[in-house]
Amino acid sequence: MIPIDSLGAIVIYGDFYNVETSEEGVAVLHSMIRLMKRKLNNMH
């Protein structure tokens, strides 16, 4: 089963990919992915 955080990341990624292709958007996307990875690591 996919963790809810991963589903959120997929939805956010889809929104960014469709709407926001600027460097700023990519930077925000990467920082959000880093935060999600940190959250998942803390859960273990």
Image (cartoon, rainbow, N blue to C red):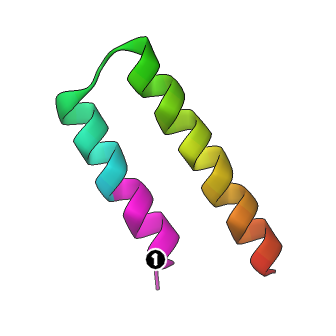
Residue 18 in the figure: left or right of residue 40? left
Residue 15 lies within the magenta run: no
Q: Is residue 15 above or below residue 40?
A: above
The residue located at (30%, 20%) in the rendering is 21
Which amino acid type is shown beneath numbered disc 1? Ile
Note whether 8 is above or below 12 in the view shown: below
Answer above or below: position of 14 versus 41.
above
User: Is residue 5 highlighted in magenta?
Assistant: yes
- Residue 17, given in percent of the width and then of the height, sits at 27, 33
Is 41 situated left or right of 7 in this image? right
In-image side of 32 versus 42 (left or right):
left
Residue most extreme to the left: 18
How far across and down, in percent of the image, does residue 31 sit? 60, 38
Residue at 34% from the left image edge and 14% from the top image edge:
22
Q: Label 1, secondary structure: give it.
A: helix
Identity of the residue drawn at 30% across and 56% down: 11
Q: Nearer the viewer, residue 13 or 2?
A: 13
Which residue does the numbered mark 1 point to in the structure image?
Answer: 4
In what quadrant of the picture does the C terminus appear? bottom right
Label 1 crowd bin: few (<14), some (14–19), many (20+), radius 10 Å: few
Q: Height in image: 14 above or below 24?
A: below
Percent across and percent down for residue 5 are 50, 69
Span highlighted in magenta in the image: 1-10
Main SS, magenta residues = helix
